Amino acid sequence: MHRKTDQSKPKFSTASNVLFMLRAAWRVRRSVLWLCLAQIGLGLANSLLGLFAAPQVLFAIEQAVPLGQLLATIGLFTLGLTLVSAATAYIGDNVIYDRIAVRTDLLSQVNGKLCQTAYTNTLQPAFLALLKKSQKALNNNDSAGEIIWETLQTLALNVLGFILYLLLIASLDPVVILITLVSSIAGYGASRHINGWEYRHREQEAACSQQFFHIASLSQDIRAAKDIRIFGMKPWLDDLGNAALRAYHHFIHRAQRVYLGTDVIDILLTLLRNGVAYAYLISLTLRQGLSAAQFLLYFSAIGGFTTWVTGILSTASELHRHSLDLSALRECLTWPEPFAFEEGAPLSAAQRYELQLAHVTFRYPEAAADTIHDLTLTIRPGEKLALVGLNGAGKTTLVKLLCGFLDPTSGCVLLNGQDIRQYNRREYYKLFSAVFQDFSLLAATLGENVAQSDTYDRAKAESCISLAGLAGKLRELPLGLDTHLGKEVYEDAVELSGGQLQRLMLARAIYKDGPILVLDEPTAALDPLAESDIYSRYHELSRNKTSLFISHRLASTRFCDRILLLKNGIIAEEGTHESLLRRGGEYARLFEVQSRYYQEGEPAHEA
């Protein structure tokens, strides 16, 4: 499913995004809201104390009050400012932890979406772009998911200060106030439009940054260290990285030139507001003879008033910019799911499962041709089925359709005669134990990687490891099942070879013990002897299970009840190993080529 989105306009408004964050804080850490209110009150108190302190002291001097009263006035304001500053600093040092808790909760939601979303969504470029934008909105203390509280707090303080100062200078000429308000509104409109430039060009930014960060990640990946050194890839990676970095810098420079326009507009509007206000105040002083204390109070109030207005303008624009990131975050979290999950029907209890493909056609988004074309297939309960064929024949895609990772473009996948689209897809996934070509190794212990859980049956895990042919390796490890894997996290982690990793993935599939076993090239990283060892265990591994076995090595297919040769997305040949050899078709030709390769390779191996 290809989803078109309007790249120029965010889906959620600023007000909606603010309410979203308020609800998140109320659910996770309500103290964030109370401390924000406290900081707003302290900020307003600090501003008012600063505004009235100097004029009040000057007024006391003008009135020639006793020295003790003058010192008391100074001391009172000083104490007030000190207490307010101390309270502000204390709250500021402690509120960050609660704000981090809210941000990390949202980050957990994004990660949960990625882990649980339909597999087809992970193939959508638009969804992946939103995912990157969401992670950017939550990846540090200065990202939108956390800094928005500072922005909201500052905006609220500016608005309250604006109202109080407006009441204070309400006796002045309304023209001064009107000019300030009109210029502020105009500036905000221009700033809002300019600050939306990055959001409107977010796809271009993602394209510029994606290549650079991929190369940077590859350079730091310990798994690529040997290739980089053996093939002398450093100069090549440097050239690619520098080119990607130049493209990204070019985008950033374009963005900065756009945002420079915002700064120029702010400067011109500030000059207009301050010029008119100061000229009027000087004229008023000359005509009415304001006292020094009154002059200072109004002078400070007008200067503060323009500061509040400028603050409203800048923080409102900043809030809008945060809102753009949060809108992308919410679009990611609310991205529609093409499969039925919890709302789907539960699977009916059954002892045996029959899988069917009924006139299934599948074409990847924007592909020119079908990968699977009008294919009909029935996999009987307990059957051992092999899928063979050249690269691109559609073997892995066929398995993804059977496993429910993809829905057909046309036709349907049936489980015991029922369309799987009606079921809770997560329950459907539980039917499958699988070893895929691309697998995930967790930075955890060996036992946890087998069980995919931090609480597991140790005896069962050891048995599964033994069935997968890793018992010898397990005995070599001093910590056994508690051995750490993943050098990126654990310094004492053990590195497994490619073949050992494949056996570990096989042990993981055995531990899950689903009724349908899927093996997608399970011996690709194994030598012939280790491969033969896996084949000898195949009957035991697939006992009482339906099994799907994908392999390029046709010798492995003789253990299966039925073999399907896929070619151009259709079943070109079907039968047992012996019947297909007797037919003398494509399967027999491929088997002969592979057999000749191994036979010719044996003398060289012995030598």
Image: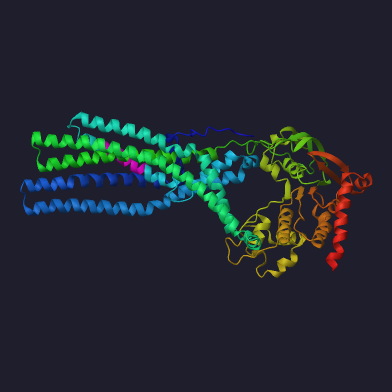
Residue 539, horizontal then vertical, whole percent = 84, 54
| Identity of the residue drawn at 29% across and 46% down | 43
Viewport quadrant of the C terminus: bottom right
326 left or right of 572 in image: left
Residue in the foreground of this view, choosing between 138 and 585:
585
Q: Nearer the viewer, residue 248 or 420?
A: 248
In this view, 514 is above or below 411: below
The magenta segment:
152-163
Task: Report whether residue 105 is seen.
Answer: no
Decide: is 159 above or below 593: above
Report x, y in % for residue 385.
Answer: 83, 46
> Going 12% across and 54% down the picture, which residue do you hit?
71
* Image coloring type: rainbow
- Residue 579 placement (x, y as % from top left): 92, 46
- For the N terminus, the quadrant is top right
Residue 312 lies in the magenta-colored region: no
In which quadrant of the rendered view does residue 339 lie? top right
Horizontal relation, residue 417 to residue 157: left or right: right
Secondary structure mainly formed by the magenta segment: helix
Total numbered labels: 0
Q: Quadrant of residue 312?
A: top left
**Residue in front for this viewpoint, 165 or 73:** 165
Mark yes or no: residue 203 visible. yes
525 vs 599, left or right, is: left
Q: Residue at x 38, y 54 (%)?
A: 94
Q: Give the farthest residue toward the right.
A: 582
| 363 relative position to 217: left or right | right
**Picture coordinates of residue 501, whole percent (x, y):** 70, 59
Q: Is residue 511 above or below residue 202?
A: below
